[in-house]
């Protein structure tokens, strides 16, 4: 209570009005019932000191803005329940993902990128080796004759199948990184 008064309140009614003005939830009937059971101390002349009013408010009352209606409480409980359900859904999704990851359905992105880089380097190396090693065979196949283009295409397609077959097999890739 912000009131620094020294003068006592003349009655319980005046004390009640003062406490309401201070923002406490109180009614006349409540303050009189509380006075009967000794929750608020009165002087022999019926007055209530400011200290007694402060002590009563601190011990037995709540500020009006902290009191919630039944509808507010229901809305609050509904909101809390929705958040709890959402958190449980998130936890379920997290556990489901972890399980699928353990079952090998997911690969960490970095591992996937390393795998794809290694495969691409392997494929490029295979192609370069083919061109260098098979150059004489390529030249013999076409003998400089454009009419033999279908033979050259067939030659490449046969080797392409071998490359793709080698490329697609699961394996531990050991490809040296460029310096």
Image (cartoon, helix red, strand yellow):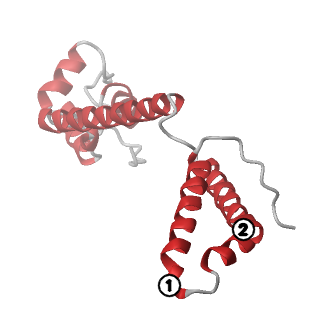
Comes first in the chain, label 1 or label 2: 2
Point 23% across, 37% down: residue: 76
Q: Where is residue 164 in the image (x, y as percent from the top left)?
A: 56, 55
Q: Mark 1 points at which residue?
A: 147
Would you say 98 lies left or right of 42 here? right
Q: In this view, does 10 lie above or below 59?
A: below
- Circle on res. 134: 2
Structural crowding at the residue carrying mark 2, measured as other residues with C-alpha within 10 Å and reported as few (<14), some (14–19) or many (≥20): few
Q: Is residue 153 visible in the rendered structure shown here?
A: yes
Image quarter in which the N terminus is found: top left
Would you say 25 lies left or right of 132 here? left
* Front: mark 1 or 2: 1
Image quarter in which the C terminus is found: bottom right
- Front-lying residue, 18 or 109: 109
- Front-lying residue, 149 or 42: 149
Q: Position of residue 18 (x, y in %)?
A: 25, 43
Distance in Å between CA atoms under marks 1 and 2: 20 Å
Q: In this view, does 146 lie above or below 46?
A: below
- Circle on res. 173: none
- Front-lying residue, 65 or 89: 89
Q: Position of residue 137 (x, y in %)?
A: 70, 70
Of helix, strand and loop, which one carries label 1?
helix
Name the residue furthest right. Answer: 179
Point 71% across, 65% down: residue: 130
- Front-lying residue, 84 or 124: 124
Would you say 80 lies left or right of 125 here? left
Corner quadrant of residue 57: top left
Q: Is residue 25 visible in the rendered structure shown here?
A: no
Point 65% across, 60% down: residue: 123
Q: Are marks 1 and 2 in contact (CB under 8 Å)?
A: no
């Amino acid at each position: 209570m912000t009131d620094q008064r020294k003068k006592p309140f003349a009655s319980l009614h005046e004390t009640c009005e003062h406490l309401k003005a201070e923002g406490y939830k109180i009614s006349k009937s409540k303050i009189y019932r509380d006075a009967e059971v000794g929750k608020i101390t009165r002087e022999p002349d019926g007055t209530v000191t400011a200290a007694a009013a402060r002590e009563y408010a601190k011990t037995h009352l709540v500020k009006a803005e902290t009191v919630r209606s039944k509808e507010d409480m229901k809305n609050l409980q509904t909101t809390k329940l929705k958040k709890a359900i959402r958190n449980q859904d998130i936890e379920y999704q997290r556990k489901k993902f972890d399980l699928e990851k353990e079952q090998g359905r997911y690969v960490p992105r970095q591992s996937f990128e390393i795998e794809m880089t290694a495969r691409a380097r392997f494929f490029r190396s295979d192609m370069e080796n083919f061109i260098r090693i098979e150059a004489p065979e390529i030249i013999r196949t076409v003998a400089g004759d454009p009419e033999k283009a279908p033979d050259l295409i067939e030659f490449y397609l046969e080797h392409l199948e071998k490359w793709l077959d080698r490329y697609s097999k699961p394996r531990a890739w050991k490809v040296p990184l460029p310096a």
